[in-house]
Amino acid sequence: MRINASTKITGIIGWPVEHSKSPLMHNAAFDALGLNFCYIAMPVKPEALEEAIKGIKALNFLGINVTIPHKETVMKYLDRIDEEARFIGAVNTIKNEDGMLVGYNTDGRGFMESLTEEGIDTTGKNVFIVGVGGAARAVSYYLCQKAARLWLHGRNMQKATALANDLKKISSCVAVTETKDNIQFADIIINATPLGMKDTDPLPFDPERLRKDQVVCDLIYWETPLLRAARQQGCKTIDGLGMLLWQGVLAFKIWTGIKPPIELMREHLKKSL
Ligand code: NAP
């Protein structure tokens, strides 16, 4: 890729952000399409967020991705927020539309695309989600519009209830559950906690009683101990790599209006892990 005076800049802000895989997949896609764009990772401390967002506008960036810990806080510095991102309460993609910064959230739709490509249709299904943080919020927004039942389980009941109350505004299928008992009635079970990132983590739930007709998803990018155990029980398993890929594909389309080379992006992500 040649950077010259016409190069349009995109990137990702977070703190920390050095671990991000997004520059690899986006730059590979820009390159393959011969687009004079580049994608860079920018560490932004929480106290510098407002200035950083002003900079995106002042420096005429095409747009950026936003990651932890800025996804919620960034909303107050934007000119407009897409309806879905507003409902979810977090922005992971910003487009600079002629000086107007517009916020989107592509995480939830990215997850749904990753299910679709695995042949999973959530319509009329019973879904159980463990974890009620930002990622659970994004995916449950879409799931609750199609599922028959959506159970939310979090270690913090107040947070779980707050999410359920928000979702109940658009769907009647949502319930909070204090125990994990309903996993046995679920068609699709999703780990939306970070449990599994470290080898020493306990499993988010006991996989012993899983059945082979159940689908187990983990939002973590690789095969976690939970997914391995579920696979050994005969379940179909889906890791978070597809969600990461598809949230990027959707962001790319928002910035450029062009469909990127998806398999090339997937290849670069896989190689980086
Ligand atoms: P988050 O906002 O911090 O939420 C994490 C959730 O997990 C919260 O409900 C939290 O409970 C719970 N949790 C944390 N540690 C726990 C533990 N030791 N035991 C039980 N519950 C625990 O994080 P997030 O942004 O939602 O991310 C969740 C996971 O999804 C992470 O692994 C992240 O890497 C992954 N993710 C993947 C993608 C992708 O593209 N594939 C995108 C976003 C996130 P408290 O609220 O009580 O702390």
Image (cartoon, helix red, strand yellow):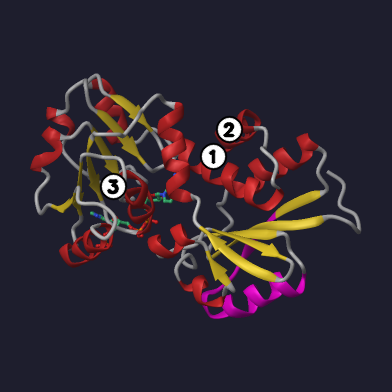
- Asked if disc 1 and disc 2 are in contact, CB closer than 8 Å, the reply is yes
Residue 153 is situated, as x and y percent measured from the top left of the image, at 18, 52
Provide residue 68's location: percent of width, then percent of height: 47, 62
Which residue does the numbered mark 1 point to in the structure image?
Answer: 245
- Establish whether ligand 1 lies closer than 8 Å to the Cβ of label 2: no
Q: Which residue is mark 3?
A: 144
Comparing 119 with 197, the one in front is 119
Percent of width and height locating residue 142: 36, 47
Q: Amino acid at mark 3?
A: Cys
The reply to whether the magenta stretch includes residue 123 is no
Label 1, ligand 1: CB separation under 8 Å? no
Q: Is residue 194 left or right of residue 260?
A: left
Magenta span covers which residues?
A: 40-59
Question: In the shown orientation, is residue 152 left or right of residue 267?
Answer: left
**Residue 204 placement, left or right of 91:** left
Which residue lies at the image location 67% right of the left edge and 52% below the top edge? 255
Front position among marks 1 and 3: 3
**In the rendered image, which residue does mark 2 sit on?**
266
Residue nearest the viewer, comparing 228 with 8: 8
Is the residue 198 above or below the residue 160 in the image? above
Is residue 61 or residue 2 the one in the foreground? 61
Which residue lies most toward the right here?
5
Labels 2 and 3: the sequence-earlier one: 3
Secondary structure at badge 3 equals loop
Tell me: residue 214, above or below residue 42: above
Ligand 1's quadrant is bottom left
Three-letter code, disc 2: Arg
